[in-house]
């Protein structure tokens, strides 16, 4: 009887014990501080991107070695590519601001590409395939940024749905859009000496509008050139 009671007493004693949780908060707090430290170190490393890319890479390697003990190449490449993309977008935004082109030029990016959208008449006159003289200043600034990266580039031409007047050299909006895309590429290759193997030209004519072609303003928005800088690693060397 006593043995049984003693056994039950031991069981009750064990159940009655309480786990001390006074300092358990320190575990998530430590995790949070580690993440915060990594964030600030990454920001610090990013500051070197525009000044010293080699030093930037060294900081990333040292940071990951310290935190995980093993450097993951894919992780480093992703961080580096993201930093380069954000820096490139920032340069294009500064160019648009400096040239007072916010009304005609927009810059955006997603997981696949950086998109510079140029609406008419910033590059071409109505129905024309020759670059406006003023547009060469803009494309020169674009080329200065493109010369510092090695990404592939697709130049797209788009028009509205108004048929071309007359029977000139250009027979359709489709052909007009493609010729304009090629004209932009020719300038970047011949005048700015960018590498030809980086470029492709596409003409969509009226078939990929931003807005319905139902008002003059919408048609104006649809007449555009898009310079799409593909994101991701390239084996080519910078052209300048």
Image (spheres, rainbow, N blue to C red):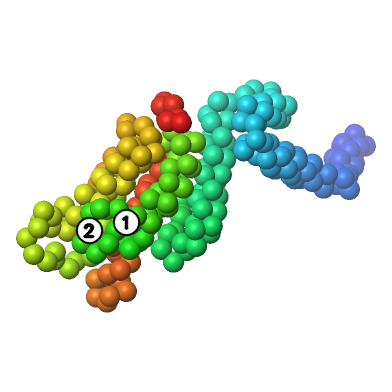
Does residue 7 appear in this view?
A: yes
Image vertical order of residue 123 relative to residue 21, above or below? below
Q: Nearer the viewer, residue 220 or 136?
A: 136
Image vertical order of residue 214 relative to residue 98, above or below? below
For the point 75% across and 40% down, the residue is: 37
Image vertical order of residue 214 relative to residue 52, above or below? below
Q: Is residue 104 left or right of residue 164?
A: right
Q: Which residue is mark 1?
A: 132
Q: Nearer the viewer, residue 34 or 61?
A: 61
Res. 182 image quadrant: top left
Marks 1 and 2 sit apart, C-alpha to C-alpha, by: 9 Å
Where does the image place residue 139, in percent across and percent down from the top left?
A: 40, 49
For the point 41% across and 63% down, the residue is: 104
Q: Which residue is mark 2?
A: 128
Image vertical order of residue 60 relative to residue 156, above or below? above
Does residue 35 appear in this view?
A: no
Where does the image place residue 14, in percent across and percent down from the top left?
A: 86, 40
For the point 64% across and 31% down, the residue is: 52
Where does the image place residue 109, in percent across and percent down from the top left?
A: 46, 50
Which of the labelled discs sits on residue 120, or is there none?
none
Where does the image place residue 48, in percent across and percent down from the top left?
A: 67, 36
- Answer few, some or many: residues within 10 Å of disc 2's Cα (few below 14, many 20 plus, some between 14 and 19): some
Q: Secondary structure at mark 1?
A: loop
Kindly give the residue lying farthest to the front in the view shown: 133
Given contact means CB atoms under 8 Å apart, are the residues at marks 1 and 2 in contact? yes
- Answer few, some or many: residues within 10 Å of disc 1's Cα (few below 14, many 20 plus, some between 14 and 19): some
Query: What is the number of callouts on the image?
Result: 2
């Amino acid at each position: 009887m006593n043995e049984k009671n003693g056994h039950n007493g031991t069981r009750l004693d064990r159940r009655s014990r309480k786990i001390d949780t006074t300092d358990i908060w320190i575990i998530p707090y430590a995790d949070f501080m580690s993440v915060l430290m990594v964030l600030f170190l990454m920001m610090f490393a990013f500051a070197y991107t525009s000044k010293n890319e080699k030093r930037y890479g060294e900081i990333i390697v040292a940071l990951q070695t310290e935190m995980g003990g093993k450097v993951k190449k894919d992780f480093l490449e992703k961080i580096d590519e993201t930093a380069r993309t954000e820096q490139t977008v920032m340069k294009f935004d500064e160019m648009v601001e400096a040239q007072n082109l916010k009304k005609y030029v927009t810059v955006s990016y997603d997981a696949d590409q950086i998109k510079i959208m140029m609406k008419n008449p910033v590059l071409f006159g109505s129905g024309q395939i020759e670059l406006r003289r003023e547009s060469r200043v803009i494309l020169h600034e674009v080329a200065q940024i493109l010369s510092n990266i090695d990404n592939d580039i697709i130049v797209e031409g788009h028009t509205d749905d108004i048929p071309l007047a007359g029977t000139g050299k250009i027979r359709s909006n489709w052909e007009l859009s493609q010729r304009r895309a090629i004209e932009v590429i020719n300038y970047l290759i011949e005048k700015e000496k960018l590498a030809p193997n980086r470029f492709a030209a596409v003409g969509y004519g009226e078939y990929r509008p931003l807005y319905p072609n139902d008002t003059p303003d919408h048609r104006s928005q649809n007449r555009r050139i898009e310079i799409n800088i593909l994101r991701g690693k390239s084996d080519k060397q910078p052209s300048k």
